[in-house]
Amino acid sequence: MYIRRTGLILLLLLLLNAGLYAQQNKTGVKTVLTADSLASGNLKDLLTSFFQLSFTNLTGKNRELNFSSNPYAVILKTNPAAASDQQYRKYRIHRKFNFGFGLKLDEDYRFNGFSSGIKYALINKRDSTVSGFLFAELGKDSLNRELDQLAEPVAELIQELDKTEEEKDKLLDELNEVLTNQSLAFSGIDSSLQRLIRQTAVKKKLIYLSRLLKNKPQVILAKEAQQPFKELKKELQQKLLWTVSVSDTTYTDQFMFSNLVFRSDILKGMGRSKPGANWEFSLPVALNLQDDSLRAGRDLRRSEFSFEPGINLVIRDRDNEQSFLEFKLSGGYYHRFAGLYPGEKKDRIRFDGTLRVRLIGDIWIPLVFSYDPKNGNVFGFISARLNFSGQSKK
Amino acid sequence: MARSKFTVNLGNLQPGSKEYRQIMDAVHKLVSKHVKAPAQKKKPRKSLTGETVTLQTATITIAVTNTEPGMTDITVKHGNNQQKATESATLIFPQVQAGDLIFISGKSLGNTAFTIDIPAKPSQKKFEPGTFRFFFRIL
């Protein structure tokens, strides 16, 4: 029943999503792409960039409304000066933290306890703002190296031209524009300036640039020069992210833990990043301490270890590289150390499938299917994740 | 009175053309060794109204955000005066005059904003993370 209902909802969401994407392309709306917007939904579930609102298990018995955020992003909202590079370093630890709290609700939406948690990124090689790899590789490409050698000699040539000061100043300003304007094509600038740039490129033996200007005169130099950076950032999305966390849930009538979870998550891209799709490997390991309800009083004697390795297929829009559909397959091994209930097995396995659909912007709808091979049961539940960016996208 | 020439009295000596050339070469060599020409002053540009433009000091402020110090590498060049910055900084360039160009190039993993405190075109420039290059044209 659940499967049929969730399947119907998913189908509607997919249709809606496809419609929204088609509409975006039709109207030619250009979205500003950042490392954050290009991140996969799986990554955002693991480490939130500003804050995330999630409605988990919308169709199940144990519904949850969660809020998670990043302390640095909250500081940044109240103190924009925290973005300066000196301050950015000062808040390094804050940037690696996520905190969250939530409300648990039963199927009649009645309060069923509080939850809270903190998460810390032990290793985050995906952060494009402090990546040593990215910084070392940036600017090493032929175009950027050659463009750095172009401005000064061309400006000198302009100043030596037999023209009025006003005409020379106009050409100098146009040279500045072609170096910085992300929408000005080389073929759109003054023909005498085009000639000077071509001559300088040949004279200075700037081979890549000479060929580019000859074969593709409509090139937008400022935009083309940013292309290698975008490629490097894509490669970064394949790097390692390792987080550790602790989370808890309280009783409905008392502020005391009924559940405590210690967790480690590893996320790593697999193979080379290709346009259109890439694979991610995830490795969550957790220790869950729960109240043993068969014993009198309240305790955390029921303990379970879980290990849920999985692979995530991220499908991206070829035009803007934003992921819009993800499918994760994972297996789960569970071992209960203590607090076994009568008839309960000490060890069990389960298979899960998660389909994440980007509805629009940073709103994700994950649909989780679980299969218990022992009982042959399949069940599913649907959730919603709303991610918000802490930094201005301008 | 400017003294740019001097005369040597050779008395009764009457050198042939070859000796004369040798004496002249020796004199020129000696003079160039001991007398150095004064450095030529840069001709000040005149504004559109014909007023002489004076030398000024340009202060360029670099503000880097959303990255850590060291994740930025910027070179600012005015003539032979070249300065570098690897984080937010204020760079000072003396003896700048109208018509001069101050070249800037570099890379950063954060957002970078440049401003100059004297009249220039552009007077400020902002860049997204990545590489960049441009110049201030002093007005």
Image (spheres, coloured by chain):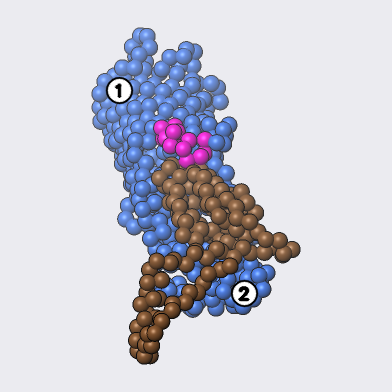
A16 sits left or right of A89 in the view? right
Question: Dividing the picture into quarters, in which one does residue A371 lie?
Answer: top left
Residue at x 62% of width, y 74% of height: A190
Report the front residue among B135 and B48: B48
Sequence-earlier tag: 1 or 2: 2
Question: Residue A56: percent from the left, percent from the top?
Answer: 49, 34
Q: How many numbered marks appear?
A: 2
Q: Amino acid at mark 2?
A: Asp
Residue B122 colored in magenta in the image: no
In the picture, one chain is brown; tell me its letter. B
Q: Residue at x 61, y 63 (%)?
A: B44
Using residue A13 as the reference point, say whether residue A132 is left or right of it: left
Q: Residue A137: x, y in percent?
A: 37, 56
In this rendered view, identify the residue nearer to me: B43 or A40. Answer: B43
Q: Position of residue A118 (x, y in %)?
A: 42, 28
Mark 2 — residue? A190
The chain ID associated with circle 1 is: A
